Image (tube, helix red, strand yellow):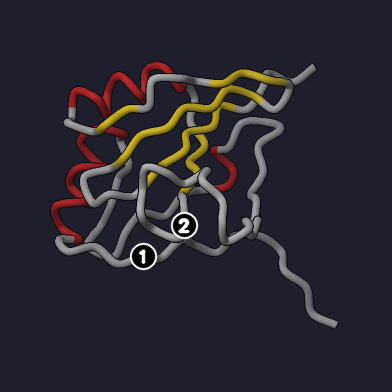
Amino acid sequence: MGQVLGLGGVFFKAKDPKALIDWYNAHLGMSMAEWGAQLDVKALPPGAYNVFSPFKEETTYFEPSRKDFMINLVVDDVKACLDQVKRGGAAVMDDTESSEYGTFGWFMDPAGNKIELWQPPEPA
């Protein structure tokens, strides 16, 4: 039987893909071509991983987005990234959360997508 080996990509619609690509490049340093960004798994910090997780239809976790998905990006510094996207005009959620799973922060990108930033915990 074949099995899934990892996350191959996140693909979604945007009214102005070029503008969104430019925004992510300018405010999160994602080097993006017209087709998107290739994120090298070797660049992930130790302990980082990909998650594939369906949520109940009634979840409020993706709010204030009206979309049926949320994108999680692994980052090296949640606070710095939130400051950067805020300067870029993103609506940043007030709270961050730290636990044994790492640090999380959230913002709404210019296309109305809720983005979760995840800084994995330091290895033990």
Q: Which of marks 1 and 2 is in front?
A: 2
Q: How far across and down, in percent of the image, does residue 53 sit? A: 65, 56
Disc 1: CA contacts within 10 A as few (<14), some (14-19) or many (>=20): few
Left/right of residue 121 with respect to residue 84 in the rendered view:
right
Q: How far across and down, in percent of the image, does residue 121 sit? A: 67, 22
Q: How far across and down, in percent of the image, does residue 33 sit? A: 25, 57
Instruction: Compare residues 61 and 98 and report the one nearer the observer.
Output: 61
Pointer 2 residue = 69
Residue drawn at x 45%, y 19% is 95
* Quadrant where the C terminus is found in the figure: top right
Residue drawn at x 47%, y 27% is 105
Residue 103: which quarter of the image? top right
Question: Which numbered disc flags the more N-terminal residue, 1 or 2?
Answer: 1
Pointer 1 residue = 12
State how many labels appear.
2
Distance CA(mark 1)–CA(mark 2): 9 Å
43, above or below 5, in the image: above
The answer to whether marks 1 and 2 mark residues whose Cβ atoms lie closer than 8 Å is: yes
Left/right of residue 69 with respect to residue 12 in the rendered view:
right
* Quadrant where the N terminus is found in the figure: bottom right
> What amino acid is labelled 1 in the image?
Phe
Instruction: Compare residues 44 and 10 and report the one nearer the observer.
Output: 10
